[in-house]
Image (cartoon, coloured by chain):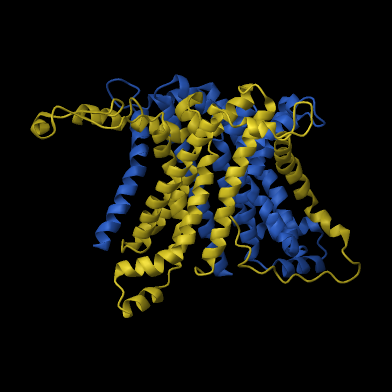
Amino acid sequence: MPADATTTRPLAAPSPAPRAPALPLRWLGVLPFFIFVALFLILPTMHIVLGAFRTTAGDFTVQNILDLNTRSIRNAYWVSIQVSFWSALLGCLIGFAMAAAVVLGGLPRVLRQPLLTFSGVASNFAGVPLAFAFIATIGPAGLITLWLRSDLGIVLQAGLWNVPDGLQALLGEQVRFPRFNILSTAGLVLTYLFFQIPLMILIITPALDGLKREWREAAQVLGASGWQYWRMVALPILFPSILGCLALLFANAFGAVATAIALTGPALNIAPILLYAQIRGDVLGNPHLGYALALGMIVITAVANTIYIVLRARSERWLK
Amino acid sequence: MTRVLAWGAFLLGMLYFLLPLWGMTEFSLRMRRDAYSFDAYASVLGNPEFQRTFAFSATMALVTILMGVLIVVPTAFWVRLRMPGLRPVVEFITLLPLVIPAIVIVFGYIRLYNTGSWLPLTGTAAGTNLLLAMGYTVLALPYMYRAVDTGLRTIDVATLTEAAQSLGAGWGTILGRVILPNVLGAVLSGAFLTFAIVIGEFTMAALLDRPAFGPFMQRLGQDRAYEPSALAVIAFVITWGCMGLIGLVTRTQKHTRVRT
């Protein structure tokens, strides 16, 4: 999570006596950190980024980037962006609703801490086990799937409702609706929400706490209705936060690999799974195209994170 | 009216969270045809591969925590004490692992440290294990650094250091016996979070081909029906345990601070 660098002034450390200008020994203290970061974070990433602009022979080229524009790769990015976008949007809305309900909606205060604790757990309960939980619940033989079929006659995978006798006069014998399958983009979005909503709750709760009671009272004194207060005071103040969270949640979903692989196997064509397959077996037939694919992922998550940081800085002006 | 809407949002949201938890628990108990049983758990826990991979990942988590503490505590301390100007840079770097997807970082490792390179870490099992531990340390960096830095904020680093120095302590003593005990709560919080992240991590371990718990779970998910749910329940309990320990540590920290 981005640090609140602006909120704390550096400690008034005793400025090292002016014995020698810019004592290079000072740097020894941070040397291990920089060596570690260079070796295991910066250099590997730079290797990928630079590799994206090289031919197999080592010459500079942009052909790898241009080659990304094939049907299957375009498609992979597009599905990834859709899954990330929808899970981020729904995660934002539902997370906001739940946080607002507990912070402002007049629910008993005892619910607050358990909700935050649970959010901490659920936002970290990602990856392979999360996929298992959803398969057991709404997969082909899952708890809800079977219950809907046996008790209500709703067959999710076929998108078919065999209407029970009592309602047939009203609805006909069968009702069709869009098919649902856990091994699809909709299934992926539904599963990702399990870590997206809690993340939203954790980030937005402090922002909701920052809404001052005076603002609401001032609005009421001036004759504003509850709806007007929200539309003209609270939401404009919260808006940068919410938008920033949307960007953060987007990046969060975009980089997720394990849940998708455990849920769908290598079948679903999304960017992280394609990259995974490429690293394992060069499915694209060109190692440097793999670098370009990875570069695309970095660019997308970097843009999303930058939006988050910029908007967060904006929102902090009000919510202190 | 507001209250009705609030209850509605809260209860519907909780329903969404509780159904999968209930689903996986119920499914994990259904292995025996006619009755609920713990057969799936017995099968998982008795699986030698489970024991091996879990031990491997738990060891990895401990190594990662140790590496994280060794790198983060001195750095955060030194930046606060002597190089406050460097803070934004260090903070930015520690946030990078949240921006660069783990799969890209491990992709870089595989290409940079392969057998033909200047540092052929992936050539041996020990080297690859080291690489994986480093990768996990990178993944844990944002959480570890934030936790420790927040911990350092609550103590007067400069005064403590000067006091220790005037009593004749060297840097090792200052760090190990003055600073570390003071930020122990923060370090433990970071450590438990690191454990929760590392124990089930899949992407890095699978791509580096290490016998870790995450890839084991994924393989089991492909060929078994009930065991994966049992694993999911176990993983959830572990995550819950780690978060609970963080809460416990934070609370006891507060108490000690009130008393002093």
Picture coordinates of residue B64, whole percent (x, y): 65, 41
Residue B58 percent coordinates (x, y): 59, 35
Shade representing chain B: blue
Residue A307 placement (x, y as % from top left)? 56, 54
- Placement of A53 over or under B5, stated as above or below: above
Residue A127 visible within the image: no
Which of the image's four quarters has the C terminus of chain B? bottom right
Q: Residue furthest bottom?
A: A221
Which residue is at a point 52% across and 32% down the rendered structure image? A76
Q: Colour of chain A?
A: yellow
Q: Is residue A256 left or right of residue B161?
A: left
Is B129 displayed left or right of A58 in the figure?
A: left
| Residue A290, picture quadrant | top right
Q: Residue at x 39, y 53 (%)?
A: A115
Residue at point 58%, 39% (across, down):
B198
Q: Residue at position x 72%, y 35% from top? A: A53
